[in-house]
Image (cartoon, rainbow, N blue to C red):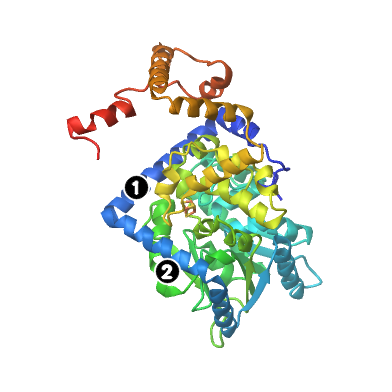
Amino acid sequence: MNPLIAPPLPFDMKPRAREAVRDLKLQQFVGNATHLKDTQRGGIFGRDFGPDYDDLRTVARDTKQYALDHLDELLERFIASAEKSGAKVHAATTGREACDIALAIARAHSAQDRAMSCVKSKSMVTEEIGLLPAFEAAGIKTLETDLGEFILQIDGDAPSHIVTPMIHKDRVATAKSFVRELGARYTEDPTELTMIAREHMRGLYRSADIGVSGANFLLADEGAAVICTNEGNFDLSVGGPPVHIVFVGIEKLIRGARDLAPFLKLLARSGTAQPLTVYTSFVRGPRRAGEHGGPKEVHFVLVDAGRVGVLASEKRDLLRCIRCGACLNACPVYRKVGGHSYGSMYAGPIGAVLTPELERAQGNADAGLANYADLPRASSLCGACYEACPVKIDIPKFLMHDRARLRERGLSPKSEGHTLKLWRWLAERPAMFRLAIRAVRLHARMLGQREKTADGERSWLKSAPGPGAGWTQSRDLGVATGESFREWFANRGKTGGGS
Ligand code: SF4
């Protein structure tokens, strides 16, 4: 498994975050891309749904919640429908089991005289279970066919975003990789770069023994998987090889095609600000008599890997996630530290709560949070992730929950406890509170005074002492302008503002 997404435990996020903040290219690429996607997301929902957007989110939340509440029943229905279509359905309790199932399928098709090969389209769950290292150890050569994943594969790199896996790289890095690894001529033109990758992959689709994919949704009524892509690589990886294996987390189940529309409307708009992904593909059973295309065998590997444990916990809402990536784009912390800082394939706000929970559900009860104690603190609790989430997962609530559990178990820094005690002491004494706030504002105004620099201007205080040093290492000290919240609250009746 790539150490970038499966680091030694307990995981220490801070060194990675510091390195990311110092990496100016990462700051530029991740900052620009996330800001753009987040702005475009707001724009397309405003344009297409206006005030009805929230109703659509509510429908999606309730539909997914219904599916989670009836998962047993939906699983049975899915298995019956898929098997009726001729597919084989396997259940894997752990990631290791899921890999072993795939290896057994591969062995059943192996030819003695040559090594096997696999074409794979993008799938988070295969990253989660470590499928590629398992295939590699068994001598099965796997080609990532999603363009971003392919570039990361030839670079020995790891995805850093759920939807845009190579968000931390640009076309210059890609051009150099193609020269080095594929012997291509140097070009930074995106169309030419795509053509180089396309030429490299085309023949491999035809010669591969196995195709592998994930799925965005599983339809219980139809026994089908739905795969949303923009590049058409899934259709080639299911159409070329004789065997196709779909790996999918059990939480992807919904009742059927009748429930799909709200999710398709929300998924592409939330992730990439598109009305729909370019391809919405369905896979059910193997090719039928008289059909010329499609695999001769289709396998669904339904992966638990901790999901049943999450379902039984107070964090069951997390399983509603449709992996759109919108909370990552909206998060001010993700924008600064990038995906590799989270030490998991699930980065950003959803990763900060899901990673420890999946770990907990698979290991001993407390290991998850202890191993990932930095993650719940990697948030400003601004609530942007909740506002961006198309299925209304209240991520800040779960971050607070985890912070409270860390405190109960003595895993929070001492300074946090002292700060909270001081805050409580002040909050119980309104006169002292007002005085303290005035003093803080006065100091902030003095220390944040602007001075001209070669690049424009910045605050006079470039390096704060003590615990404030972390702030000024990567940010300018801002000065709050306008009225304070208390002033606004006191004045709102007089000016007619507020509600
Ligand atoms: S938590 Fe919500 S916003 Fe974040 S990836 Fe999942 S569905 Fe998207």
288 vs 324, nearest the viewer = 324
Residue at 66%, 73% in the rendered image: 90
As drawn, 440 above or below 382: above
Provide residue 87's location: percent of width, then percent of height: 61, 79
- The residue beneath circle 2 is 260
As drawn, 432 above or below 71: above
Residue 278 visible here: no
User: Disc 1 residue type?
Assistant: Gly
- Circles 1, 2 touching at the beta carbon (< 8 Å): no
Per the image, label 2 sits on a secondary structure element best described as: helix
**Mark 2 close to ligand 1, CB under 8 Å:** no
Residue ranking furthest to the front: 429
400 vs 447, nearest the viewer = 400
Instruction: Estimate how packed mark 2 is, as few (under 14), some (14 to 19) or many (20 or more) residues with alpha carbons within 10 Å.
Output: some
317 vs 45, nearest the viewer = 317
- The residue beneath circle 1 is 42
Residue ranking furthest to the bottom: 289
Mark 1 vs mark 2, CA separation in Å: 22 Å
Q: Say which quarter of the image contains residue 301.
A: bottom right
Q: Say which quarter of the image contains residue 484.
A: top left
Mark seen at residue 241: none
Horizontal side of residue 59 vs 127, given as left or right: left
Residue at 55%, 81% in the rendered image: 81
Residue ranking furthest to the right: 112
Provide residue 482's location: percent of width, then percent of height: 29, 23
Provide residue 279's location: percent of width, then percent of height: 45, 64
444 vs 238, nearest the viewer = 444
Residue 235 visible here: yes
Provide residue 107's location: percent of width, then percent of height: 77, 71
Pointer 1 or 2: first along the chain: 1
User: Disc 2 residue type?
Assistant: Leu
Position of the C terminus, as image quadrant, is top left
